[in-house]
Amino acid sequence: MKTLQEIEQIRAKTLKEIDVRSGKQGVRIVVGMATCGIAAGAKPVLAAFEEEIGKRSLSNVTVTQTGCIGVCRLEPMVEITAPGKDKVTYVNMKPDMVKKIVAEHVVNGNLVKEYTIGYFENNN
């Protein structure tokens, strides 16, 4: 049996973790890791984001994964959310695209338009 104080500590820790996962404290990068994403190459994309964020020591960035984002034909897909900005979805991701997205979008706040879902849908 836990004491009330122990339960409160668990609650506080859990709320802090939820806050980090929700991206409220910074930029949140979410890689689609459903079967379709994995089959299309999402694992190396996820690893590339983790590596690049680590190399740059970006403490305000959370890299996480989710299930199906919903447009399997455009996998691997990555969603980036920053506080106060609209969510951006990048499609057909390859590990070699990650460095540019981190440098331009995550660090400098500029979209890499040619990798976005809107650009792809309008030009293909």
Image (spheres, rainbow, N blue to C red):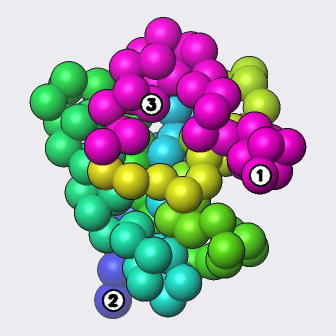
What range is drawn magenta here?
96-124
Q: Position of residue 46 (x, y in %)?
A: 34, 58
In this rendering, does residue 17 appear at all? Answer: no
Q: What is the CA distance from the residue labelled 2 to the residue labelled 1? A: 60 Å
Q: Secondary structure at mark 2?
A: loop
> Main SS type for the magenta part?
helix
Which residue is drawn at the image coordinates 57% and 77% (left, top)? 67
Residue 115 magenta-highlighted: yes
Q: Which residue lies under the disc numbered 2? A: 1
Q: Residue 122's image quarter?
A: top right
Q: Which residue lies under the disc numbered 3? A: 101
Classify 3 as above or below 10.
Answer: below
Q: Are marks 1 and 3 in contact (CB under 8 Å)?
A: no
Q: What is the CA distance from the residue labelled 2 to the residue labelled 3? A: 48 Å
The type of residue carrying mark 3 is: Ile
Classify 75 as above or below 104.
Answer: below
- Residue farthest toward the top in the current orientation of the protein: 108
The type of residue carrying mark 2 is: Met
- Where does the N terminus fall, quadrant-wise? bottom left
Q: Nearer the viewer, residue 100 or 27?
A: 100
Which residue is drawn at the image coordinates 51% and 32% (left, top)? 27
- Residue farthest toward the right in the current orientation of the protein: 122
Which residue is drawn at the image coordinates 27% and 35% (left, top)? 53
Residue 58 magenta-highlighted: no
Q: Residue 81's image quarter?
A: top right
Q: Position of residue 34 (x, y in %)?
A: 52, 82
Q: Secondary structure at mark 3?
A: helix
In this rendering, does residue 91 appear at all? Answer: yes
Q: Are marks 2 and 1 in contact (CB under 8 Å)?
A: no
Q: Which residue lies under the disc numbered 1? A: 124
Q: What is the CA distance from the residue labelled 1 to the residue labelled 3? A: 21 Å
Question: Mark 1 or mark 2, which is nearer the start of the sequence?
Answer: 2
